[in-house]
Image (tube, coloured by chain):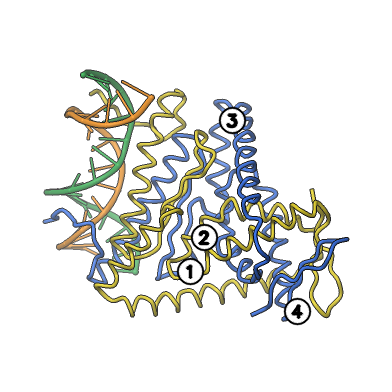
Chain colours: A yellow, B blue, C orange, D green
Amino acid sequence: MTRRKVKLAFIVNNSSRKNNLPKRKRGLFKKAYEIFTLCGINAGAIIYSPYDPTPEVWPSVEGYEPSDYYFLELAEIDRHNNMFNQQEFVQQRITKADKLLLKKKKDNREVNLMEDMYRFLQIGQLTILAGVHTKPALARDLNDLGYLVDMYLNSRNRLILILEGGSDVEIGESL
Amino acid sequence: MTRRKVKLAFIVNNSSRKNNLPKRKRGLFKKAYEIFTLCGINAGAIIYSPYDPTPEVWPSVEGYEPSDYYFLELAEIDRHNNMFNQQEFVQQRITKADKLLLKKKKDNREVNLMEDMYRFLQIGQLTILAGVHTKPALARDLNDLGYLVDMYLNSRNRLILILEGGSDVEIGESL
DNA sequence: GGAACTATTGTTAGAAG
DNA sequence: GCTTCTAACAATAGTTC
């Protein structure tokens, strides 16, 4: 049991590094779960393991159990008040996003929308972290985005974004 | 200093709960950083604090310091090999996304693209978690997406997505 | 090759400044 | 509000089975 203090640096030994990951991962996700439970807020974690093509996230995407549990817990304390806060909270975030967008008026740069879509899908599951209240809308949106990208894949062609009633604006090209 | 074992449950006392959050947050982010450093992989965490309209994430979005540090560390060990693995890894994920998309061929459902964009921007900073190698492309893409949404806001009108040379497809409406 | 163990290091709840 | 302190609790590195 000789365990010396570990130096916070890349573990050079391959097996040690690999063996460490699941332990640490469990620790990280547990911490996220503890914050989630103790403080009643949405917290999440993600790990891009080289040993798994799918990024591992907490809360889990498939089952949504932690979120459900979350509301169950809150229901016994102050559910209504919490939902109100959540709404205020989201409103603040949207206002902030608005301001951010107004700062972004710039030159007409080319957009590789496809890349964005891919990236969106890759991190799409993270949107669950955005809040329990968005859950039903989320599932729909993710599917719709899939449809949108699917259209792109079918077309295998140039993608154009148009503002109705205005002038056509070319946004990007396919791969 | 009487500290009894804490029950893993919502902290009802408001000030206790609020005081707990920064400590726990530090702990969570530290764990993410440790995995990132020790195991040489991309790991991240996010907290949607009710006390802050901006979600707090690790790694930080502004400075990109942790990522830089990451490569600095790896450079001394096996940078080339790691980058190769990263590429393979990304390729796997893209293949996976492709399969996911093919499963999504469905009916023509309406897409509220604006919602997606908002959500993308809200979680956009999380894309940094997708990998260090995407860093330069990422900054550009986020700006371009901002531009795209900006156009939308300017138009205050219906958004149409068109596949060039094909039939026009109506995708969604503004709020 | 993963589950269990445990000495040791690490984290944090509550209090105090 | 925020640091700091520290007893108590928790996580885990190295090892064993």
Q: Which residue is mark 2?
A: A127
Under tag 4, what secondary structure?
A: helix
The chain identifier of the residue carrying mark 3 reads B
Query: What quarter of the picture does the N terminus of chain B occupy?
Result: bottom left
Classify mark 1: residues with Cα within 10 Å, few (<14), some (14-19) or many (20+).
Answer: few
Q: Which residue is mark 1?
A: A134
Q: Which residue is mark 4?
A: B155
Q: Please determine whether, in this image, residue A42 is positioned above or below residue A91.
A: above
Under tag 2, what secondary structure?
A: helix
Which amino acid, mark 1?
A: Thr
Q: Quadrant of residue A5?
A: top left
Which amino acid, mark 3?
A: Asn
At x 52%, y 72%, the residue is A93
Q: CA distance from mark 1 to mark 2?
A: 9 Å
Asked if residue B144 can be seen in this view, the reply is yes
Under tag 3, what secondary structure?
A: helix
Look at the numbered discs 1 and 2 and tell me whether their residues touch, using CB distance below 8 Å: yes
Looking at the image, is mark 1 or mark 2 earlier in the sequence? 2
Q: Are marks 1 and 4 on the same chain?
A: no
**Horizontal arrangement in the rendering, residue A74 relative to residue B159 (left or right):** left
Under tag 1, what secondary structure?
A: helix
Asked whether A119 or B109 is in front, the reply is: B109
Residue B26 locus on image (x, y percent): 37, 53
